[in-house]
Image (tube, grey):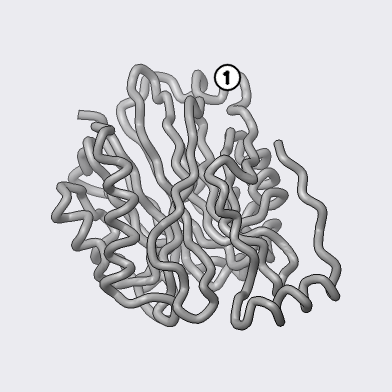
Amino acid sequence: MRVRRGFSGAAALALLLLGGCRVGIDYPDLRGPRYAGPTPAGASAARGVVDRLRIVSFNIQYARHVDRAIALFASEPALRGADVVLLQEMDADGTRRIAEALGMGYVYYPAILRFGTRRDFGNAVLSRWPIEADAKLVLPHPSRYSHNQRIATAATLRVGGERVRVYSTHLGTFADVSAGQRRDQLRAVLADAAAYPRVVVGGDLNDHDVGQVALEAGYAWPTRREPPTHRLGRLDHLFLKGLALPDTAASGTVPDARGASDHHPVWAVGLFR
């Protein structure tokens, strides 16, 4: 694990003035900062024979209410049985706390150090199954106003006898980039995933319709017609390749985040063929 010292308020202000409209400092190094914790011994064995994965994606706004998020995972039936959890807008400590509460291993890469919170801001993959490899992808098209980058956190999971490549990503906002540039960002993730037969891509995509790109690449889009996940619409999605959808109870949106975030968690189930 890498440890980073915090910035003073004066230092953050000085950097903000130097950076114009920047909201944070990019971490351009693909190697890190990187934070990870192993899957607890016996966590995957306790699942028994695996024929499916339950995946959850949740943007926990600036990791402000981690305790509320943990309580939501504990109390909401749709979230309690998750095998894989994708988190966005996280810092290292919040990721670790949620992973420990859920009995999961994790990998987390921050995209930037955010001035407003003086904390890191990035994406995490949590798993009940061993994480065999991981990577950070820097996505194309930095923000038009802040010039800061967006990333995806990738992890290769060993699920029983199968390997599944998983991506937690957070595409640019309506103000950051155009709809076409968001499609380019998703295409960059799918290009990295092209070599893997079983793939999960999910996160806060800041777009109602960007999933058309995944459909064209042969992915299932179980969250396509789910209710809105944010006051601006249905922004959070999951895409699956090499995993079939069940006939019923294939996906859902938790209607009440109970103060944990301004987003609602989404979930989907994928079956091993």
Relative image position of residue 126 (x, y in whole percent): 53, 40
Residue 168 relative to residue 5: left or right:
left
- Residue at 28%, 33% in the rendered image: 196
Q: Amino acid at mark 1?
A: Gly
Q: Quadrant of the N terminus?
A: top right
- Residue at 36%, 36% in the rendered image: 165
Secondary structure, mark 1, is loop
Could you say which is closer to the camera, residue 271 or residue 155? Answer: 155
Could you say which is closer to the camera, residue 249 or residue 130? Answer: 130
Residue 82 seen in the figure? no
Question: Hey, which quadrant is residue 34 in on the image?
Answer: top right
- Report the residue marked by disc 1: 42
Could you say which is closer to the camera, residue 249 or residue 162? Answer: 162
Relative image position of residue 40 (x, y in whole percent): 62, 25
Q: Is 177 rendered above or below residue 69?
A: below
Given the current orientation, which residue lies at the most extreme front position?
18
- Residue at 18%, 45% in the rendered image: 247
Relative image position of residue 194 (x, y in whole percent): 25, 39
Relative image position of residue 90 (x, y in whole percent): 61, 57
- Residue at 81%, 63% in the rendered image: 7
Residue 63 relative to residue 237: left or right:
right
Residue 171 seen in the figure? yes
Q: Residues within 10 Å of mark 1 (few under 14, many from 20)?
A: few
Q: Is 233 rendered above or below residue 47?
A: below
